[in-house]
């Protein structure tokens, strides 16, 4: 097939978003060309700039001989990369540069399971017989619709140029200069194959459920994550991340995860698709606890929460000098702008320190909210870098500091674990400063998603960790069951003190079921346990045998 026919084929192929042309995968996430632009040429160069903000790279790139340029956040991006190269076999060079880590501090030992290392391993060894990448088995899986022989052609015909390895001490601008030199001087090559587009493996349909929020409780962050992912994978509705996209997700709206011991750093159970290390968690904590904005990043949650931008110094200074301000709360107003840093034409507000100061003065305040959202900015930025974490609220109850966090949109497989540990660090900081213990961490995800690139890995993870020991302990109380005077007596006991809370009496399991169900909401494990014990108690009562709770079931007479 000659060049003209190949280009014609590329223009007419249908991508996974249902649109004609190329790129054929993750089109709405590509930085260049824009998803609304049809730019199909015989240019040879693709560029990945990892976690570096696109606005610091794209304007400086030589475009004339550039085929495609994009961020590359996670190892799961390998599959759309493969689809796009096979969809446009004119791509003969793949250049890598940019920040390799989502969060990083100098000298830290960070987990090496990064997207950059996944790319390096792919170009070094390709995929294995299980359609995975060695060392990245839990985070990368390649769809069976893409033939292994086609994937091998990429390794043989596309040259990988790793500027991060070749120029380890160079600045970002120096690397971009080298990219532009390469784009102009690399040998021009023909397509290495005919363009190909491949289908997608089908996923399981969602189980029916009542809709709305789903609430899960976990002892620590790994335990809560497994339970949460299980619920999304089972009940999540198939949806699109955006219009005109091929990014299909399983989604639950308003996923609520309650972590009872968020400060637990035990990683002996490490179920995450990219396993976390203590070093990686500590690096993320440092970022979320810092007001500094690293070069090349659009934002960090630490910067948004601790150096919140306000565009006017005059408005705040006017407030500070007003009579109402000075008389605030019986002349306590002098501390109110303590956490405002006045710049020449704007202010920065340390909202976390402000929460701490408020709670020191009123430990039961309900006004301790911090936000990341700038309405005026978001009107212009809804197409790119709007923060996912929108607000946090700190509340003291039972002399513990509970933290509630709301995310508007949440990648639950890759993003949620680090986010949870980061939020736990904020909680620990506030609790320490006001001299109380950390309590519950509640994370509400408005749109909780599992991307289709992760379905296979999630299935394997759930099979592996579904056998974790389950208990019937219930924070709402324990049930004591006895058979006495011709009836079944069920007593609800306080889970910590053992004090009697309620008592129910009946002759059948059905009768007691209705009484208990009206009064209490039980978790599934506890409900199944209680139903089983009530059925055994009824059977023992009818056969005039001794009932003993939690004993091995046996009965001498037929029911």
Image (tube, rainbow, N blue to C red):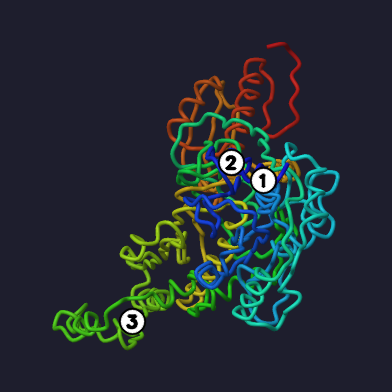
Residue 89 at x, y = what percent? 71, 50
Q: Do the residues labelled 1 and 2 touch (CB within 8 Å)?
A: yes
Tell me which label, 1 or 2, sits earlier in the chain. Answer: 2
Task: Give me the C-alpha separation between circle 3 and circle 2.
Answer: 46 Å
Which numbered disc covers residue 332? none
| Crowdedness near tag 2: few (<14), some (14–19) or many (≥20) residues, C-alpha within 10 Å | many
Q: Nearer the viewer, mark 3 or mark 2?
A: 2
Question: Image quadrant for the N terminus?
Answer: top right
SS class, disc 2: loop
Residue sitting nearer the eye, 415 or 184: 184
Which residue bears the numbered disc 2? 15
Q: In this view, does 136 lie to the left or right of 176?
A: right
| Crowdedness near tag 3: few (<14), some (14–19) or many (≥20) residues, C-alpha within 10 Å | some
Residue 251 at x, y = what percent? 52, 42
Q: Are marks 3 and 2 in contact (CB under 8 Å)?
A: no
| Crowdedness near tag 1: few (<14), some (14–19) or many (≥20) residues, C-alpha within 10 Å | many
Which residue bears the numbered disc 1? 87
Which numbered disc covers residue 347? 3
Residue located 50% across and 70% down the image: 59
Q: In this view, does 437 lie to the left or right of 542?
A: left
């Amino acid at each position: 097939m000659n060049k003209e026919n190949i280009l014609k084929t590329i223009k007419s192929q249908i991508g996974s978003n249902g649109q004609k042309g190329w790129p054929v995968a993750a089109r709405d996430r590509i930085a260049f060309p824009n998803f609304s632009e049809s730019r199909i040429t015989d240019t040879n160069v693709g560029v990945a700039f990892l976690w570096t903000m696109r606005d610091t790279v794209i304007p400086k790139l030589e475009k004339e001989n550039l085929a495609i340029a994009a961020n590359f956040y996670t190892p799961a991006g390998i599959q759309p990369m493969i689809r796009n190269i096979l969809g446009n076999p004119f791509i003969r060079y793949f250049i890598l540069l940019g920040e390799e880590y989502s969060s990083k501090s100098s000298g830290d030992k960070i987990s090496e399971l990064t997207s950059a290392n996944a790319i390096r391993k792919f170009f070094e060894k390709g995929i294995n017989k299980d359609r995975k990448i060695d060392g990245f088995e839990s985070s990368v899986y390649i769809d069976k619709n893409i033939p292994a022989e086609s994937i091998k052609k990429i390794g043989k015909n596309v040259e990988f140029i790793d500027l991060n390895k070749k120029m380890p001490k160079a600045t970002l601008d120096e690397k971009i200069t080298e990219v532009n030199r390469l784009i102009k001087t690399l040998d021009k090559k023909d397509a290495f194959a005919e363009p190909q587009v491949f289908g997608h493996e089908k996923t399981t349909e969602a189980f029916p459920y009542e809709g709305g929020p789903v609430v899960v409780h976990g002892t620590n962050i790994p335990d809560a994550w497994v339970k949460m992912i299980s619920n999304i994978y089972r009940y999540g509705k198939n949806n699109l991340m955006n219009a005109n996209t091929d990014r299909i997700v399983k989604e639950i709206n308003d996923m609520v995860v309650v972590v009872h011991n968020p400060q637990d750093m035990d990683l002996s159970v490490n179920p995450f698709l990219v396993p976390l290390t203590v070093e990686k968690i500590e690096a993320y904590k440092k970022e979320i606890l810092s007001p500094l904005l690293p070069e090349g990043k659009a934002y960090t949650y630490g910067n948004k929460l601790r150096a919140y931008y306000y565009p006017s110094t005059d408005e705040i200074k006017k407030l500070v000098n007003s009579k109402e301000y000075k008389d605030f709360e019986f002349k306590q107003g002098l501390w109110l702008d303590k956490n405002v840093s006045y710049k020449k034409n704007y202010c920065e507000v340390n909202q976390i320190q402000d929460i701490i100061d408020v709670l020191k003065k009123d430990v039961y305040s309900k006004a301790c909210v911090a936000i990341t959202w700038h309405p005026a900015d978001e009107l212009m930025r809804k197409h790119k870098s709007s923060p996912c974490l929108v607000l946090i609220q700190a509340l003291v109850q039972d002399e513990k500091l509970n933290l509630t966090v709301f995310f508007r949109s949440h990648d639950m497989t890759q993003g949620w674990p680090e986010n949870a540990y980061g939020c736990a660090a904020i909680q620990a900081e506030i609790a320490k400063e006001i001299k109380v213990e950390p309590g519950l961490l509640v994370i509400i995800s408005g749109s909780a998603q599992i991307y289709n690139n992760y379905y296979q890995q999630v299935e394997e993870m759930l099979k592996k960790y579904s056998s974790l020991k389950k208990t019937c302990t219930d924070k709402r109380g324990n049930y004591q069951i006895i058979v006495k005077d011709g009836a079944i007596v069920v007593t609800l006991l306080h889970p910590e003190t053992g004090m009697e809370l309620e008592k129910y009496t009946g002759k059948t399991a059905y009768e007691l079921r209705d009484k208990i169900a009206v009064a209490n909401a039980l978790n599934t494990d506890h409900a199944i346990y209680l139903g089983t014990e009530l059925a055994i108690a009824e059977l023992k009562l009818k056969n005039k045998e001794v009932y003993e709770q939690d004993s091995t079931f046996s009965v001498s007479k037929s029911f």
